[in-house]
Image (cartoon, rainbow, N blue to C red):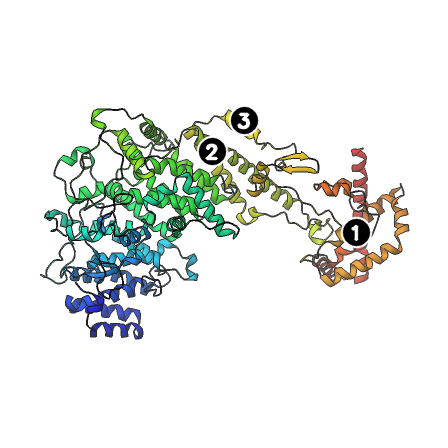
Amino acid sequence: MAFPHLQQPSFLLASLKADSISKPFAQRCQDLVKVIEDFPAKELHAIFPWLVESIFGSLDGVLAGWNLRCLQGRVSPVEYSIAMEFLDPGGPMMKLVYKLQAEDYKFDFPVSYLPDPVKASIQERVLPDSPLYHNKVQLPAAGGLGLHLALNPFEYYMFFFALSLITQKPPPGALHIRTSDCAYFILVDRYLAWFLPTEGSVLPPLSSSPGGPSPSPAPRTPAVPFASYGLHHTSLLKRHISHQTSVNADPTSHEIWRSETLLQVFVEMWLHHYSLEMYQKMQSPHAKLEVLHYRLSVCSALHSPAQPSLQALHAHQESFMPTEEHVLVVRLLLKHLHAFANSLRPEQASPSAHSHAASPLEEFKRAAVPRFVQQKLYLFLQHCFGHWPLDASFRAVLEMWLSYLQPWRYAPEKQAPSSDCQARSVSERWAPFVQENLLVYTKLFLGFLSRALRTDLVSPKNALMVFRVAKVFAQPNLAEMIQRGEQLFLEPELVIPHRQHRLFTVPTFTGSFLSSWPPAITDASFKVKSHVYSLEGQDCKYTPMFGPEIRALVLRLAQLITQAKQTAKSLSDQYGESTAARPFLSWLGFYPADTNGSYPGNDLDEMGQDSVRKTDEYLEKALEYLCQVFRLSEAQLAQLTLALGTTQDENGKKQLPDCIVGEDGLILTPLGRYQIINGLRRFDIEYQGDSELQPIRSYEIASLVRVLFRLSSAINRRFAGQMAALCSRADFLGSFCRYHLLEPGLSDRRLLSPVGRGHAASLARGPRLSLRFLGSYRTLLALLLAFFVASLFCIGPLLCALLLVLGYVLYAVAMTLLTEQGKLHQL
């Protein structure tokens, strides 16, 4: 075994380190290819740890390495092609790995950089349940820095490759990089296709030289009962020594050890960040209450600090938060695993195939998802559903979940497209998968409901997520299979002699998957209960997906969908009306100014009318799918819509938020607060003060507005009596003066503030002249444009001004007549 602190200085390593600073990237890779081909394994094992770290970066994230997560072919085509060729499963780097594998070299990997549950378990001297760590944990030697794992070259390479997704932080400029175009994402896809093939068998490792020795397989460990989370903790050192046995004697197991190692490394590094024991502890009401107290104590110094044990529990459960890129890579893994598991031929996938001699690859395809992925993925999804921000980035988590829920999408057989547009029915062959993953369908659906009820469904991105989930669960026969699975779980446990000894415990994931299989359980009810109890604990309280509690939440979501549809339509109509109501004269400054200082535009302006249409379509189809899944009738939806007051008034506008009338006016109800927070309804806020004293706008000249205000104030003080006398006349001249000198009375406005009503009479103002419109850039620009056009027709400035005044007088006379006629009709 090669320990770094015992190795002699390597001249080759020093030379490569110097070249990494002075030579360009392409030249360095060419030199590395020559070194791998020419030097023996004895020399290469000294440079291997440095080379792996220089490619994937250091485990502490300080060194970025080749920055594969930001390397794109369209941005850096030369570097991209060189890196992909060098790191390809059949490329020079893998040749180096197999060359060192043949000599059985070991490399130290510090335990401190493993995921938190694994690190905590090993530090407590308890061996983790994954066979990946068996016979690899090494106690620190004299002068050592801590626990470490003794890994073979392939394991060491894959550990660094998988962890670089988590430890390496992308640079600030990488936020807009498309993950699927990056070198790291494509390498993951290539490794999965190479080591987990959907067609044929796993390709043998390339020999380092023609006629050279083939790499030896990784040591195998027989099935032995190890301590797991929540079980009896025994000494790691004792078990480590007592179980250092010979390797598995089955030569056929050597065929796929790399495939098994790759999958276990990816699952452990990407998914195993939340332990089952901690999750089950957090489900109890007492633990949830304690965590709430802990959060409050962090936010306020007035609260007493939480207990240290609970702080550790809380920190251990919430310290890790995956990134969107991390989730996308996990989704790629899940999609490939479904294709890998579904590549079994029908005769191989049948239960009777277990009794026949099956190849290790076939056995691995059956065991890959349920044995290695199911438990850790469920905990990973639970954490994401509970802690991901309530924004559109949750779409990545949602698609990962939906990809796992639909293994039939990745099955090799494809049905011929039917003539109608109906969705394809889910075959009954997937009923066992649905039953063995019941919680992933039902409890996570409940988690999605709780998120959807707190999001703004008017947003097209949020509406799309609701539509996607509803569409998936509305696939024909899927809801029936979920319901049958729930019935099997809720079936009472009969006291039958051959079932009295059964205990619902966590499945043992020890040793290699090639260990002897446990007896096949044909009791479907027992399998479903074992799945639920193993994840949620023996005392869990299961909430049926088709029970009254979730049905009530679905009805509430249907109400919000209806509200969001009406809100989107109202905002769209308001935007269209406000745009159509702005004539050309308003741009010239002759249209009444917006005294509220608000613009008719809103969030829908940025989305566009096309997005509004899509939002309505998403919500309409989502409501239709939810009605199909939960058998909601049109009468129920209509009743709920009326109960929430979502009907429109006679003017076609949205009503005010839900309120009750109090002594001082309207008081918001909890429903009204929810409607305002989610943008479903709002009050029409209007400026009800002195229009002359409004803040200066960005489209006005500040100094000119102030000068005009002083001038108009002086005129109003000087001629106040004369203007009042003119406005009091009953003839046409009085109407003409009232149109120009009187602003709309406060009595004509809809005063929403209860305080404003009491002072409405005192705020009434007499006739006055307002010159503020002359301080607007638009008005001045319009006047300049008018004088410029007049000059083209040889009209002088004085004559142009007279024509403008005459035109405005005619316009004002017409508006006066229309205004007076409208008042007569109102009487």
**Which quadrant does the N terminus fall into?**
bottom left
Secondary structure beneath dot 2 equals helix
> Is residue 498 visible in this depiction of the protein?
yes
Q: Amino acid at mark 3?
A: Gln
- On the image, the x and y values in percent for residue 806 come to 81, 52
| Residue 553 image label | 2
> Is residue 800 visible in this depiction of the protein?
no
Q: Earlier in the sequence, mark 2 or mark 3?
A: 2
Secondary structure beneath dot 3 equals helix
- On the image, the x and y values in percent for residue 9 come to 21, 73
Q: Amino acid at mark 1?
A: Gly
Front position among marks 3 and 1: 3
| Residue 639 image label | 3
* Image quadrant in which you'd find residue 748: top right
Q: Look at mark 1 in the image and give the residue it sits on.
A: 807
Rendered view: 675 above or below 97: above
- On the image, the x and y values in percent for residue 130 come to 24, 48
Q: Earlier in the sequence, mark 3 or mark 1?
A: 3
Secondary structure beneath dot 1 equals helix
Front position among marks 1 and 2: 2
Q: Are marks 1 and 2 in contact (CB under 8 Å)?
A: no
Rendered view: 53 above or below 265: below
Left or right of 299 in this view: 375: left
Q: How many marks?
A: 3
Q: Amino acid at mark 2?
A: Leu
Q: Earlier in the sequence, mark 1 or mark 2?
A: 2
**Real-space CA distance between mark 1 and mark 2, rounded to the nearest whole angstrom:** 63 Å
Crowding at label 3, few (<14), some or many (≥20) Cα neighbours within 10 Å? few
Front position among marks 2 and 3: 2
**Which quadrant does the C terminus fall into?**
top right
